[in-house]
Image (cartoon, coloured by chain):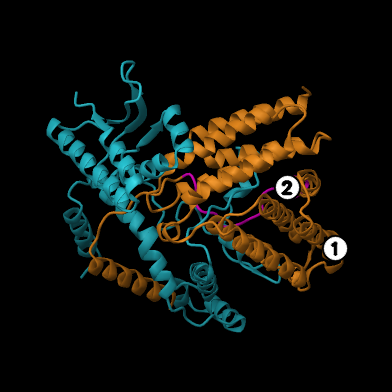
Chain colours: A cyan, B orange
Amino acid sequence: MNEHSFVSKIITQASYHNPEAFPNEILQGIVNLMENEILPAVFTALSLPEFPSAMKVFRESRDRRRKKRFRRKASLEETRVLIQQLEYIKRRLIGYRDSSSIEPMVDFSDFDNFMAPYESNRSLIRERLEFNGEPMKVAPVERPSKPYVSTLPPTRVKHQINLSQDIQDRIMSDSLFENVFKAVETEIRELAPSHPFEILEVSLHSDCELPDWERTILTLTLPPMSFENKMRLWQRYDIRIRKRIAEVASQMDKSHRKRVEALNKNLFIHVDLT
Amino acid sequence: MNSVYRAIKEDVKAALEAFKNDSFGAMNTLSNRIMANAIFDSDKKLILPGFFLKDVAFVFGTLKIREKATAFSTAKSYGFKYVKEIDKLVTDPIDDDKLWKGFHDFHRNIRKFQMSDFEEASYSENIEFTKKAFNWLLDYMDKEKNVLFEANNLFLDGIINEMSRILRVHSGELTDIFALSLIRALERYYDYFRRKYTIPSKGVDQKRVINEIFPFIGKIRSIYTEKKGASEVGEILWELVKGWREFFIQYMELPTARLRLEKEVERGIELPAEVKKKLTESVTKTLEKEIS
């Protein structure tokens, strides 16, 4: 299979399995897939050739000056650099396995200024390849030609979830409400990539005449789409959220279950259909 | 209110805005700025808001990059409450006891959002275990401290990794928070110290490590075992933070591989396992051909 037809096949498969995704989302998705799954798997399993010795590199560079045919091939020095860089990536990927923590963490900067000095553009890989504290000489990785990094702008619909102050206070003061709302939010976030919304506003409402009747209102603002699609999306959110709340209730004892059921009854999902 | 207080009050306000906008990278920068500004004044408690806000930024930055959907906005309710509390507490004089207590409460509340589903379903608070583990780790750190002579060691990161995992999963008391915070500060300081005092082929200058790093290990251990309070912790924290910010002035950012924080982790598209396998094989073959 040639390169072109292989790429076409991947795009076709991606479109087939993701019928709701737009073409640019498919492209972005493939890039993400490469970054997050394919390349880590490749680098972890990659068998690297023998590291060329300094003597070999010296001999080759001497021969290169003499023989023209060598000039077309990558030099051993370049191969050494590539092997070092791949080995570094591989070690980082494999090294992660000894961790006793499940989730990855961010590694924050020590900067107190938003203007990054030009030096921060240098290759991080080059700096980390050290032996006895001394940096090894490795060619820099140029940023523009860096493979596997997407230059496409993100196209997925960005969503925003806003909780009113009274909802935030309720979360912090009522652990059962917190449990239910945590599950509801997780469900919404899981659904969001395939069922996009722009804004979700969550607030508490009560009536002057019936102050004890408190309702949780979820108001979804959707991106432009047909009325039918909006209805379908609304229904989908409603079904999945209710199902999730029922799951939470099923894990609780009888007295708590009643309260969760009451919370479910008093939860309303609104969608602007105009 | 003196000029440093005023500057820090404004830094905290900016950090609060960054928090509201989910800009945790910016919030981290502003937290560093608070600590950098605090060293211009003699009030040692002024570093605390920056130190705590940096931790809040780290917690939410980490939650934000998780691949699995989390109740991020629900968690943010607790973060928002604490950040607003810090803003209120930046008054002359600073009530460090209240700030530390708020920090401890924040950690107790946020841990359930930091755990994975499996962890959350399985673990309950076990403060006794945390105490036992922390005692062991502090003893171990003291016993094996000579590892800090090696230029490429990650000893303090390793201790922090275990302690933060234990606190997240089993929760802990304020003294546990004190110990972890001090080791975090020591690690930031040591990272620069190592850069400055590494002798090629010989490792980190042993005499300096013994005189300048080891005393902190002893102090942290006694803070924990003798259950010392916020003011004693504040003294050590001040020394470490001041040293760290001074090193930053000398060397600026240390090179390290960092996760891309600001990029929202996009959910991937679905591809059949067979296609993924072929794609992996194809890339592997091409790469192996390239380097052979």
**Residue closest to the far top:** A208
Predominant secondary structure, magenta span = loop
- Figure quadrant of the C terminus of chain B: bottom left
- Figure quadrant of the N terminus of chain B: top right
**Residue drawn 26% across the image and 32% down it:** A268
A23 displayed left or right of B99:
left
Identify which residue, B27 or B247, lies in the foreground: B27
**Which residue in the structure is indicated by mark 2?**
B248
A149 displayed left or right of A257:
right
Near mark 2 (Cα within 10 A), the count class, few <14, some 14-19 or many ≥20, is some
* Quarter of image, res B4: top right
Is residue B251 highlighted in magenta? yes
Amino acid type, callout 2: Phe
Identify which residue, A136 or A182, lies in the foreground: A182
Q: Are marks 1 and 2 on the same chain?
A: yes
Give the x, y percent position of residue B273: 25, 67
Give the chain letter at badge 1. Answer: B
Give the chain letter at badge 2. Answer: B
Amino acid type, callout 1: Arg
Pointer 1 or 2: first along the chain: 1
Q: Which residues are magenta?
A: B246-262
* Quarter of image, res B103: top right
Label 2 element class: helix
**Residue drawn 70% across the image and 51% down it:** B178
Is residue B249 highlighted in magenta? yes
* Quarter of image, res A114: top right
Give the x, y percent position of residue B149: 77, 69
**Which residue in the structure is indicated by mark 1?**
B208
